[in-house]
Image (tube, rainbow, N blue to C red):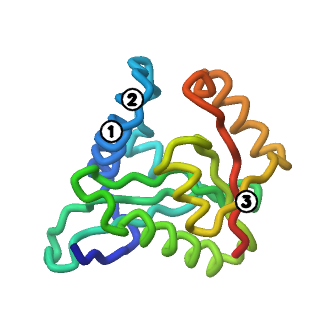
Amino acid sequence: MTVRVRPARPADDAATEQIETIADALLIERFGAEDWPPPTTAHERATLPGFVLVAEPADGGTDAEPVGFVHVLEIDEIAHLEQLSVLPDHGRQGIGRRLVRAALTEARTRGHRSITLRTYADVPWNAPFYASCGFVETEPDSAFHHRLVATEEALHLDRHGRRVQMTAVL
């Protein structure tokens, strides 16, 4: 499937929330994690500083429904890839990679020199995928990143596997 990537619009809010819920089901199933945190609500995502890009079928016309999205936070002069989700039935078609590349380009355009993310080290579609996109493991080095680690610890995300920070130089 050929997709186009564009900035999200308010009309995409419900779709991004649904995409994240459906995509998270893969991790919930892998980990047997019945207490997985809910997705970011559409309202919250829209009010956070940063940007959201969506991927939609290129031949879908003006009413095409998104099949994936990437959410990048911009906090304390840091670009942080907060969420990348693609509908599982559209997986393994390069849509996630296309969204990551678009996010890197947008972050660079906005003046960032690097972009970070936090993910599971040993889930194939997490750290190994991001490494193939140019991210390398790094240590948390800012108050923002330490807050992310504290949030992950409070949610007990590490019980499902090792969590890592990764950075791509733009």
Which residue was labeled with disc 2? Answer: 28
Q: Amino acid at mark 3?
A: Ile
Above or below residue 83? Residue 152 is above
Dot 1 or dot 3, earlier in sequence: 1
Say which quadrant the N terminus sits in: bottom left
Which residue was labeled with disc 3? Answer: 78
- Residue 83 in percent (x, y) is at 49, 50
- Residue 155 in percent (x, y) is at 59, 23
18 horizontally vs 24: left or right: left
Q: Residues within 10 Å of mark 2 (few under 14, many from 20)?
A: some
Q: Secondary structure at mark 3?
A: strand
Residues 118 and 49: in front is: 118
Residues 153 and 90: in front is: 90
Q: Nearer the viewer, mark 2 or mark 1?
A: 2
Say which quadrant the C terminus sits in: bottom right
Q: Secondary structure at mark 2?
A: helix
Q: Amino acid at mark 2?
A: Ile
Dot 2 or dot 1, earlier in sequence: 1
Residue positioned 34% across, 44% down in the render: 23
Which residue was labeled with disc 1? Answer: 21
Would residue 47 be visible to someone looking at this image? Answer: no
99 horizontally vs 136: left or right: left
